[in-house]
């Protein structure tokens, strides 16, 4: 052990104990340790279902005894049904911020999940309870569904969240790294639509969202007032499904989607049983939100109307602020933290629900400045929609740069990239991807962007070996732009 200087006695004992402990852990094959119950569940995956007799009993529908606060009278939402879709591994953790903020004005939100549970006055429904038993049988993606039921029946509900660690069983690059709970989610969409009509028929509109989606009720009501509820409509944040044989866009689930009462009636009444007809097809689709578009298109001939950015799927930190979004109303925000739910709702309340624009979201979220530089940080400056073509820098304009040649090409360095951004009047942020040993045919890339967003830390696993990413913002320009865009015409 010549490579280590052995410390004085008390420390040496601590070290020995520590080393001994690590050796024991290594011998036990410890990998950041799933708990025992997860190990048991993983061990059983693929073998579990139908070995035990769990009959599907539906929870009776009941109205929650929720009293809405008095400020809610500012919102006329009685003709709208609100549906939140979640899963038992996350429900009790994720629902409270949504229920305490935007849904606090909804006396009877429908909470659809994969297990019957209660949360305070609210009933959480197992929306899979009418799923076709034939389509479930032999489908290992339902293992977690049965496992959850078994734990609930045994009074071990507190062990359910740990099942969130179970990995997805099927391999595909699109669903890589996802969980078994995520894989089960796609089976719930069509049954949610059917069940929403069952429990709250004849509403003008039906809004579907997830537990980490914030919904501005005021902006929703205002938007819907401009739409024809007699038409079969489907609104959301459009994502193209390239594998679909014809041109088809689906509404991204986390951004939420809105169906007119006419659409839901056609789905649940005129085409009664439609959800069950699709049950056996869903296993071969990647995403449940895509299945909604497929069913609506194929059976009802209803296509999606894209209302981005009003409904959108970025977290607040990743949201691109700029000309295209600034004066638009916010209907949904996705990936919301409890603090963000609270901050946004308090703001809407303080304005008496008189409207909430992306300009306001910026004001309450970012207190002025972005950092000037952040390493290992992704700000999505390379996003095709907002990117500026990178051209050589005008080195005539540079005075005290030591190496003018290096500075000519923005792809050469973070500093040259920054100059590239400064020289483009519309550029407000940039990012620089560098590769170690890229040699003469350098792969290093500068990206310039017309929109500003904070972005997020990037994990080394998301990068190629030897790749690094740094981001920069032109705060002076952003502040000036924000100052000049304070007024949004009504
Ligand atoms: C399963 O349970 C139900 C209700 O408890 C019972 O009626 C049925 O006979 C059971 N089936 C089997 C195969 O044990
Ligand atoms: C609330 O909305 C419904 C349907 O949009 C409308 O018929 C009703 O008049 C509204 N009520 C109030 C008090 O504005
Ligand atoms: C909201 O309404 C209250 C009570 O009517 C009023 O006192 C307050 O000034 C209003 N606030 C705004 C921002 O309009
Ligand atoms: C911004 O994003 C780009 C492209 O992903 C990245 O290279 C750059 O480092 C990021 N910059 C900041 C300041 O986050």
Image (spheres, helix red, strand yellow):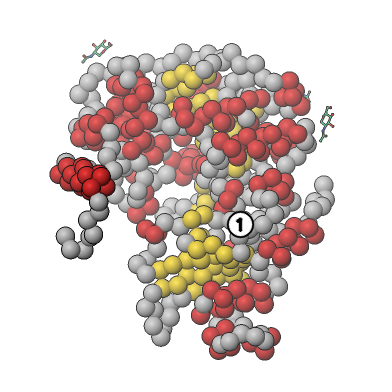
- Where in the figure is residue 487, as x and y percent of width and height? 82, 52
- Where in the figure is residue 477, as x and y percent of width and height? 71, 65
Of 224 and 116, the residue lying toward us = 116
In the visual, does 291 lie left or right of 350?
Answer: left
**Residue 126 in sight:** yes
Circle count: 1
Q: Residue furthest front?
A: 8
Image quarter of the N terminus: bottom left
User: Please, what secondary structure does the residue beneath circle 1 have?
Assistant: loop
Q: Is mark 1 within 8 Å of ligand 4?
A: no
- Where in the figure is residue 231, as x and y percent of width and height? 65, 37
Of 31 and 291, the residue lying toward us = 31
Ligand 3 located in image quadrant: top right
Q: Residue at x 52, y 77 (%)?
A: 413
User: Looking at the picture, does residue 316 appear above or below residue 265?
Assistant: below
**Where on the picture, by quarter, is residue 424?**
bottom right
In the visual, does 430 lie left or right of 39?
Answer: right
Q: Residue at x 75, y 39 (%)?
A: 355
Q: Residue at x 60, y 52 (%)?
A: 319
Q: Residue at x 15, y 44 (%)?
A: 27
In the visual, does 3 lie left or right of 429?
Answer: left
**Where on the picture, by quarter, is residue 191?**
top left
Circle 1 is placed at which residue position? 453
- Where in the figure is residue 408, as x and y percent of width and height? 58, 85
Of 5 and 365, the residue lying toward us = 5
**Residue 135 in sight:** no
Of 454 and 424, the residue lying toward us = 454
User: Looking at the picture, does residue 441 appear above or below residue 74?
Assistant: below
User: Looking at the picture, does residue 108 appear above or below residue 183?
Assistant: above
């Amino acid at each position: 052990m010549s490579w280590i200087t052995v410390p004085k006695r008390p420390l040496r004992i601590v070290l020995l104990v520590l080393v001994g402990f690590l050796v024991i852990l290594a011998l036990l094959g410890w990998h950041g340790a799933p708990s025992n119950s997860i190990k048991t569940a993983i061990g059983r995956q693929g073998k579990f279902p139908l070995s035990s007799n769990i009959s599907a009993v539906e929870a009776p529908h009941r109205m929650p005894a929720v009293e809405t606060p008095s400020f809610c009278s500012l919102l006329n939402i009685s003709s709208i049904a609100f549906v939140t879709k979640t899963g038992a591994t996350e429900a009790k953790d994720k629902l409270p911020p949504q229920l305490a903020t935007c849904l606090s004005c909804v006396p009877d939100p429908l909470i659809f999940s994969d297990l019957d549970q209660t949360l305070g006055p609210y009933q959480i429904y197992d929306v899979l309870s009418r799923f076709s038993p034939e389509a479930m049988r032999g489908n290992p993606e339902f293992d977690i569904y049965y496992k959850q039921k078994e734990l609930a029946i045994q009074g071990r509900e507190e062990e359910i969240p740990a099942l969130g660690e179970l990995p997805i069983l099927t391999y595909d690059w699109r669903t890589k790294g996802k969980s078994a709970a995520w894989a089960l989610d796609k089976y719930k969409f069509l049954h949610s639509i059917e069940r929403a009509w069952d429990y709250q028929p004849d509403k003008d509109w039906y809004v579907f969202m997830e537990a980490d989606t914030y919904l501005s009720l005021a902006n929703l009501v205002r938007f819907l007032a401009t739409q024809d509820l007699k038409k079969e409509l489907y609104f959301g944040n459009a994502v193209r499904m390239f594998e679909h044989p014809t041109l088809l866009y689906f509404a991204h689930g986390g951004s939420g989607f809105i169906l007119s009462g006419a659409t839901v009636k056609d789905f649940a009444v005129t085409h009664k049983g439609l959800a069950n007809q699709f049950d056996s097809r869903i296993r071969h689709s990647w995403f449940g939100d895509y299945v909604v578009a497929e069913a609506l298109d194929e059976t009802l001939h209803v296509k999606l109307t894209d209302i981005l950015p009003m409904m959108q799927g970025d977290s607040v930190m990743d949201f691109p602020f700029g000309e295209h979004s600034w004066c638009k109303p916010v209907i949904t925000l996705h990936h919301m933290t409890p603090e963000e739910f609270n901050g946004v709702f308090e703001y809407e309340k303080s304005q008496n629900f008189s409207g909430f624009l992306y300009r306001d979201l910026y004001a309450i979220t970012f207190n002025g400045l972005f950092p000037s530089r952040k390493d290992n940080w992704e700000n999505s400056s390379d996003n095709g929609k907002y990117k500026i073509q990178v051209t050589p820098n005008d080195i005539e304009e540079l005075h005290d740069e030591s190496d003018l040649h290096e500075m000519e090409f923005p792809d050469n360095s973070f500093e040259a990239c920054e100059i590239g951004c400064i020289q483009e009047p519309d550029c407000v942020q940039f990012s620089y991807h560098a590769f170690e040993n890229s040699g003469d045919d350098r792969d290093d890339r500068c990206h310039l962007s017309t929109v500003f967003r904070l972005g997020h830390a990037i994990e080394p696993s998301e990068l190629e070996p030897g790749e690094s990413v740094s981001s920069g913002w032109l705060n002076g320009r952003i502040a000036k732009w924000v100052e000049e865009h304070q007024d949004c015409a009504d």
